[in-house]
Amino acid sequence: MNPNKNTKEMICIVCPVGCHLQVTVDNDEVKVTGNRCPRGEEYAREEILAPKRVVTATCRLENEQHPRLPVKTDAPLPFEHINELLDRVYELSLPTPIKTGDILIEDFKGTGVNLVASRSIE
Amino acid sequence: MRTEQIDTLVIGGGAAGMSAAATVSAAGFTTALVEREDELGGVLLQCIHNGFGLHEFKEELTGPEYAERWVRNIESSEVKVFCGTTIMEMSLLEDGRKECFGYSPEYGVLKFVTKTVVLAMGCRERNRGNVMIPGTRPAGVYTAGLAQRLVNMNGYIPGKDVVIVGSGDIGLIMARRMQWVGSTVHAVVEIQPYPSGLTRNISQCLNDFKIPLYLSHVVSKIYGKERVEAVDITPLENGVPNHDKTFQITCDTLLLSVGLIPENELSKQVGIELNSLTNGPTVDSMLMTSIEGVFSAGNVLHVHDLVDFVSAEARLAGENVIEYLKGKRPERELSIKPGANIRYVNPTRINPDAESDIYMRPLVVSNNARIQLLVNGEVVKRQKKPHVQPSEMIKLKITPKIFQDIEITPDSKVEVTLQDEP
């Protein structure tokens, strides 16, 4: 048996049908079965090789009426960086005013992903 | 007492209220929008996750971003906004207008005399009492939405070791949120044999964190004197709890995501007829309630799963208010009822001479289904649905063409059914 070969099961989340996918990784080759459309294969490939998520959270705001500011990444962030990003978010304490889209952390860890404000506070 | 003489009073400044108010005001009618919180936006402000707006704005927004677009829209309109104001009473005047009393720290008692009203009060969460979980009554039992507000808006973390009851989307989203603020979610317990939230949320909010989902299980007891200390979890076998297989999880917090109830205290007070299937007002094809000139849209009418549908439905209510103020009424209406595998249909009356969307909720899960519209037992419209489940509302377009070639009378029975494709 090839030690680099393994099979994983996952449910496709691209659309509400939720196909049950079997994904086999054999060295660099990814094989997907169980998908009803090509989008399922693409999803499985990315989930196996480089899973990413949009991260949403809140950070501290120096404002009495609004103690928390909602924030988000402006693109999906590689999975392995999420916890480190959250630690950075919780260290932030920002003055107001702030506008939706304001960049709070730029190009996090060289991923090209920014953390932005997702609400304006006057 | 300050008195406002207006064409439309919109009660509730969330997604539905903002959409209805913006629509009516844009047609030149005087519109007031009343919100009990200190700012517009409603529950969207605490829903900091993304996934909103794909229909309305063709992009994926967070809740606060979605709300902000509508707030800008209201700010640039002629709508008179009254925040921090609660409408407590409504009565009918002899000339058909409505008199509504609002209370607010800023204005004191406010009186609105209005030709029309749009009810857009949203919904509230079912709580421990509604699902009757036995045990002690310690601190640490929260509804998921309240916990969401505490974490996302007030900056408090409700607990460290969490069990969630119900796999609705709010519960799933809160599972991820609690993990991301450093707490541990030990289990999600769902009474149904299938998850009630979206697959996407099961995958990204539970599987990403390896949180176990117990389907066909219930929380059968809560332990703890001052604070929650543990819960018992019992599997259901053929719908009956098997107490021999009960197991315990140590935790300090229990979050309940066990459904939403339309907020209709005001509707009841003024005597509006409610639909027992939706817990919202019974409405006709104009989304008008049993009281002339009082309309309803959004989660107060029936609980939606997409805010985009709330905005769209409220826009339709607003358009109907405009028609009503211009003195237009449908020439004829037919009642429509839920048939096989459909829990409810909204509205409960349709106008066969106009194009409109009706919303319904299925009772079953199917990956190969067909929606049928029947008039007096005869199929007049069929639509394939590649996937249906109770947590996803179905929208069906009604057009005058459907009724063109069939004989209809006011007594005609219109029914919508769902079955597997043959």
Image (tube, coloured by chain):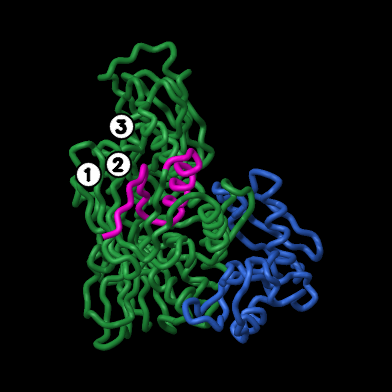
Secondary element at tag 1: loop
Under mark 2, the amino acid is: Val
* Vertical position of residue B288 compared to residue B90: above or below: above
Numbered label tally: 3
> Which residue position is annotated with label 3?
B337
Under mark 1, the amino acid is: Ile
3 vs 2, front mark: 2
* Vertical position of residue B197 compared to residue A59: above or below: above
- Figure chain in green: B
Q: Chain of mark 3?
A: B
2 vs 1, front mark: 2
Instruction: Please name the residue shown 78% across and 72% down the image.
Output: A111
- Figure chain in blue: A
Say left or right for B206 vs B261: right
1 vs 3, front mark: 1
Q: Do residues under tags 3 and 2 come within 8 Å of each other at their CB atoms?
A: no
Secondary element at tag 2: strand
Say left or right for A26 vs B306: right
Magenta residues (range): B1-29
Q: How far is the residue under mark 3 from the one under mark 2? A: 22 Å
Q: Counting residues from the N terminus, which is met first, the one under dot 2 or under dot 1?
A: 1
Q: Do residues under tags 2 and 1 come within 8 Å of each other at their CB atoms?
A: yes
Under mark 3, the amino acid is: Lys
Quadrant in the rendering for residue B380? top left
Residue B36 in the image: state x and y as whole percent: 35, 63
> Which residue position is annotated with label 1?
B272
